[in-house]
Image (cartoon, grey):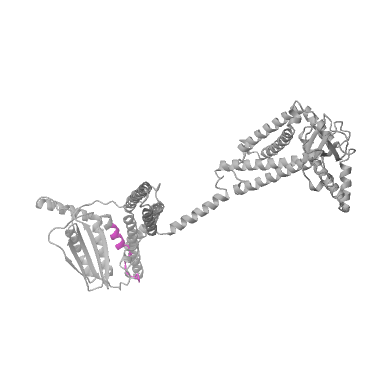
Amino acid sequence: MKLRENPARKALAFLAAVAAFAATAIMGWYQLANYDALWSPDYNGGDGYSILYLEQIDEGNIVRLLDLYGQRDAGVELALYQEREIARLEQKLSAENTNLRWQLLALEEEGQQGQDEGQYQQRTVLHGNTQQRLPDQALGVYWTRYDTDEDWAQINPSGNPLELVLWLDPDFPVADQYQQAFQSLDQWREDRELLLAGTIVCAVLGVILTAYLCAAVGHRPGREGIYLNWFHRVPADLLLLLLGTGVAISLSMAWEIARFYTYTDLSMSGQLVFIGLLTAACAGLCLGGLLTVAVRCKAHTLWRSTLVWRACAWLWRLCRQAVRSVSLVWKAVVAGLAYVLFTILNFNSSGGLWLLVSGAAIAFLGLWAFHWKKIRAGAQQIIGGNPEHHIDTRYMPGDLKRHADELNNLGQAISTAVEDRMRSEHFKAELITNVSHDLKTPLTSIINYVDLLKKEHIDNPKAMEYIEVLDRKSQRLKKLTEDLVEASKASTGSLTVTLERLDLGQLLDQASAEWLDRLEAKGLSLVHTLPAEPVWVLADGRHLWRVLDNLLSNCAKYALEGTRIYLGLQTYTDSAAFSLKNISREELNIPAQRLLERFVRGDESRTAEGSGLGLSIAQSLTELQHGRFEISIDGDLFKATVTLPRAPAPQGGPDALEDQGEEAGAGQEG
């Protein structure tokens, strides 16, 4: 693992691999180019690629010289630079300055052609740097025939075909590039096994280092997974195109150097240096391309990092957005019209294609209907109280999938909102409970000390008045604290509810009797209309009594003096409802539902004794008993209605009725 993550070792391995491949390319190319000279058993020292290629290069110089000769013989006045060119070429191609021997021959008879010595005697030497005949063991013999050449008409007035023959002096009397090439080929031939072994070793070393680099690329110290640097983030197709262009330029330059500068204007060492640098650059570019492909394959970004993929992805997104922008109705219309047009066009043709397309359309509609049914079932689950239900959207068409995803997100949003609300309610209830509990201890001490002061004989009437105020305010604070705790418990559903059969009419009658004196003291008259027969409901007697007590207390606090309070009871098939109506002393200029909020009172001046929690507690207690609490305002008329589920009448005679009445009374007393 450390070998793969060490940057220095990977850099050295990269340079070594480039050098190994460059050496392999250089040695391998020269061995292949001079294969006959190195490995042929019949090699005579002059058939090597380098020597023959040198002769072809000098052939161009000879042809140039013959062209100038032809112009001069034709009477054309040559320019000064052309005269200098003739002199330079004559000196360069003279026998004293080169081991190359050349002759331009004219055939005496057109039908006599060949290259053997007997036929050579029938040729006439027109130009050359030697008059000797072609030796039997000449080196690097090269022939070129010119059947007709108008440019050399002055050189060859007979118009017979011409032949240009080149060979090397086997003694190599001149120290030139031909002698150097000949000696180099002989030296390479002596060391050919060592040269081949070096080529193989360099190639194997390059392959091993390349395998190591491919395995190590993308790993960095202290990082998990594959790391892509800036080089590997360049678009793959653009990068490979640039690398390929660099490789092509490097190879072409190396080829040109090997072709035109072989042992002529450059020395052998200089040529090898330039070719080595170019092949090293080519190897580095190829290795870099291979490594970037390897790391992108590891990171699974090879295709995604190309410009082609980005263009295709952009076009795909554009087309998908265009399709999505079209409504489902228009999609259906277009699909229907396309199917009708397809049916018309294939009406007289074979029915196989029509049946195939029709079957595919039917299958798609069936799949669409199946997934639509799945979405409807999921929506019913979410609406039915299971917001965590997840609709499976696999294999769904695009429009249905988006609709299903929206329903899934809606269910998740509902769950999150419910959880947040429950958490908030729990926090508020816990806060109210804790604060109320902390208030009870000092409040109890205040009430106790006020009672002790009231028992003392205090002659100062002002002091007694202050004590009465303290007593009244402390009792009100105690009632407010108790109401806070009860409202918190009722809203969170933490109260214990025991539902039982109760006679609602009897309970209302008892509550009226208990509150009658207090209401009359406030100048209020209570008028109740109750049925004679029992009205059985399913409720908790203790909580229902608190609801009645809060409503009557609300009337006593806020009803207009000298008015009546109406208490009525109505029965229905599955429920029973009692209502309480009174005329408000203050103007009711707020919505009815606002009165059900905590600490909201009809007396906005807040001079009355109420805490603003009575109606909220009554509503919560009613809902805990599976009932419904409603209020309405009509001008100054305030009406509260409590609806509870009916309970079946008890079976049996008067004893059973009496027992049920005792149970109801026990519930009321609780």
> Residue 635: within the magenta?
no
- Report the span colored magenta: 604-621
Picture quadrant of residue 260: top right
- In this rendered view, identify the residue nearer to me: 568 or 56: 56
Picture quadrant of residue 619: bottom left
How many numbered marks, from 0 up? 0
Picture quadrant of residue 112: top right
Hey, which residue is sitting farthest left in the picture? 653
Hey, which residue is sitting farthest right in the picture? 96
- The x, y position of residue 217, in whole percent, is 62, 40
> Residue 612: within the magenta?
yes
Q: Residue drawn at (87%, 31%), measured in percent from left and top?
A: 171
- The x, y position of residue 199, in whole percent, is 71, 31
- The x, y position of residue 609, in whole percent, is 32, 67
Res. 606 visible in picture: yes
Q: Residue drawn at (76%, 26%), measured in percent from left and top?
A: 42
Screen quadrant of the C terminus: bottom left
Identify whether 414 is placed above or below 270.
Answer: below
- In this rendered view, identify the residue nearer to me: 340 or 441: 340
- Left or right placement of residue 226 versus residue 201 in this view: left
Res. 441 visible in picture: no
Hey, which residue is sitting farthest top in the picture? 41
- The x, y position of residue 519, in whole percent, is 22, 68
- Left or right placement of residue 641 versus residue 164 in this view: left
Identify whether 554 is placed above or below 183.
Answer: below
Screen quadrant of the N terminus: top right
